[in-house]
Image (cartoon, rainbow, N blue to C red):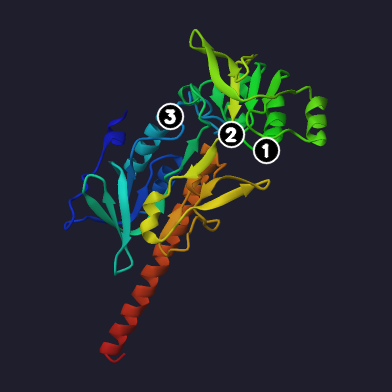
Amino acid sequence: MTAEAEQTVTVTPAGRERRYEVVVVGGGAAGLSGALTLARARRSVLVIDAGRPRNAPAAGVHTYLTREGMPPARLLEAGRAEVTGYGGEIATGTVATVGCLDDGGFRVALEDGSAVVADRLLVTTGLLDELPEIPGLAGRWGREVVHCPYCHGWEVRDQAIGVLATGPLAVHQALLWRQLSKDVTLLLHTTPELGADDLERLEARDITVVDGEVTALEVTDDRLTGVALADGRVIPCQALAVAPRLTARAGVLTGLGLEAVDLEMGGHVIGTRIDADPSGATRVPGVWVAGNVTTLNEQVIGAAAAGVRAGAAINADLIAEETRLAVAARRALSGADGT
């Protein structure tokens, strides 16, 4: 890690809080991109990050132009160095609560008891992948157990791919993975039987359909070799595609009255998100969100772009407020001297 990336800021105890124009909660691609945008606009900005990125288990970041295959940790290291290079600050910690101040700002309290104050807030805390409770599944997450054909498909191409059904979108998922391999098996697991139309579509693409609940993963020499069913059968596979429930990490926003809402796709709730407009602005003035906390299917490059949009919107909002105050001050001065 470079010396610039290692720079941190000491967050002062309650009662002596340092004030920033913008505090960014979450230091992934969205948060760092927002912070970089704001730092280059000469805003005082602090990024608070707990150091638990969602994509940490992955070997590399994909479909990110010029950064294809870069390990996630290296991407964040480079991002932190760029932010601090423009005067932004990074603090390692976990935000416990966020509260509104009488002057329109926000008090951001950390779990260690320290706090800072922000004029504006950008929350980029991402989401949690809630996996089915199958023994061994979580331990191989990001390795042979994958979720996104655009993030992991090339790496498992031409392998025997099992698709674990977790809802009504399972057929769609199996068809997506069929693009990567001729050997795809849809494991119905605990989902209802498929209709005739779905079965016809799968058969037309030579996708095997297997009934029966998956109860365990078969691993040989630290590699996935198959899945075990409740009836004792073992279905061979080298990769297992799983669509988890996607839950926004939004607990820090509850103190501001922002609650996550359900996101439906195909009549099925796939997770929760914080509602926001295209710039990331929430219904609470002064609070923006970006990345997976609001857009569940955002990939890393999309999250970075969302952070830039939010950063630019926050800067414009601050300029509008500063201009309003400057006009009011000028009018007051003109009135005082009679001009």
Please provide percent x and percent y for residue 104.
33, 67
Using the image, determine if residue 143 lies above or below residue 116.
Answer: above
As measured in the structure, the alpha-carbon distance from the residue carrying label 3 to the one carrying label 1 is 26 Å
- Residue type at mark 3 is Ala
| Dot label at residue 56 | 3
Label disc, if present, on residue 169 of the rendered structure: 1
**Which of pointers 3 and 2 lies earlier in the amino acid sequence?**
3
- Which of the two marks, 3 or 2, is nearer to us in this view? 2
> In which quadrant of the rendered view does residue 336 lie?
bottom left
The residue that label 2 is drawn on is 243
Three-letter code, disc 2: Ala
Give the SS element for disc 3. Answer: loop
Closer to the camera in the image, 287 or 275: 275
Q: Give the alpha-carbon distance from disc 3 to disc 2, as whole Å.
A: 18 Å
Q: Secondary structure at mark 2?
A: loop
Question: Considering the image in quadrants, where does the N terminus appear?
Answer: top left
Residue sitting at the far bottom: 338
Kindly check if marks 2 and 1 are in contact, taking CB atoms under 8 A apart as contact: yes
First of labels 2, 1 by sequence position: 1
The amino acid type of the residue labelled 1 equals: Leu
Instruction: Give me the residue at 31% from left, 90% from top.
Output: 339
Q: CA distance from mark 2 to mark 1?
A: 9 Å
Which residue is more in the foreground, 96 or 324? Answer: 96
